């Protein structure tokens, strides 16, 4: 990256996260909730996958904490990632089960267990071809 180029933080997928911009602000995931059946989704949907209505979806802020449903340690990483690392399904209180990277602990089978409480972290996932940080969501064990 040249000296006159400023490194940017860009979302991996636009519209799924809100990154805090001040100490009074809080980062969160952006989902949607159906006003007809009450189901909540992540990422946000324009049509409810349960009642199939397209005029009932409202954007909603999702909880920043959840619990591990299941996880795995990845030992062979795709290009742009460094193994080993942990991937997990995280259950949020509103209902969605989210597939996520896990940070803040050793990438080993003994690092987590089903039911471990985790909290949202907005962090660098990888870099783009220009060297900008591509940011997204991860979860880490609470208290780590």
Image: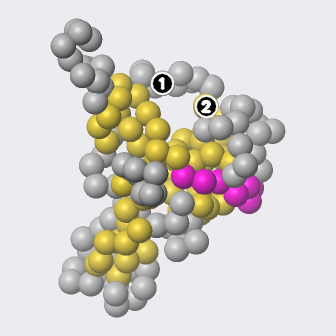
Residue 45 falls in image quadrant: bottom left
Check the image and name the residue furthest to the right: 110
Q: Residue at x 20, y 17 (%)?
A: 5
Q: In this figure, which residue is indicated by the disc labeled 2?
A: 85
Crowding at mark 1 (Cα within 10 Å: few <14, some 14-19, many 20+): few
Check the image and name the residue furthest to the bottom: 36
Residue 115 falls in image quadrant: bottom right
Model colouring: secondary structure
Q: In this figure, which residue is indicated by the disc labeled 1?
A: 81
In percent of width and height, residue 124 lies at: 44, 33
Query: Would you place residue 65 above or below residue 86 in this image?
Result: below
State the CA–CA distance, disc 1 to disc 2. Answer: 9 Å
| Residue nearest the viewer, comparing 7 with 115 | 7
Q: Look at the image and tell me whether residue 139 can be seen.
A: yes
Mark 1 touches mark 2? (CB < 8 Å)? yes
| Residue nearest the viewer, comparing 93 with 21 | 21
Residues rendered magenta in the picture: 114-120
Q: Residue at x 57, y 48 (%)?
A: 139
The quadrant of the rendering that contains the N terminus is top left
Magenta-drawn stretch contains 137 = no
Query: Would you place residue 109 above or below residue 39 in this image?
Result: above
């Amino acid at each position: 990256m040249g000296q006159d180029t400023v490194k940017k933080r860009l979302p991996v997928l636009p519209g799924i996260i809100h990154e805090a911009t001040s100490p009074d602000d809080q980062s969160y995931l952006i989902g949607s909730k159906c006003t007809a059946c009450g189901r909540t989704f992540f990422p946000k949907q324009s049509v409810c996958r349960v009642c199939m209505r397209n005029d009932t979806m409202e954007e909603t802020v999702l909880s920043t904490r959840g619990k591990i449903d299941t996880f795995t340690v990845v030992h062979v990483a795709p290009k742009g990632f460094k193994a080993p690392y942990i991937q997990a399904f995280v259950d949020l209180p509103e209902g969605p089960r989210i597939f996520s990277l896990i940070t803040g602990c050793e990438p080993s089978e003994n690092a987590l267990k089903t039911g471990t409480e985790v909290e949202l972290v907005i962090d660098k996932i990888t870099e783009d071809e220009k060297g900008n940080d591509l940011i997204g969501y991860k979860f880490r064990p609470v208290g780590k």
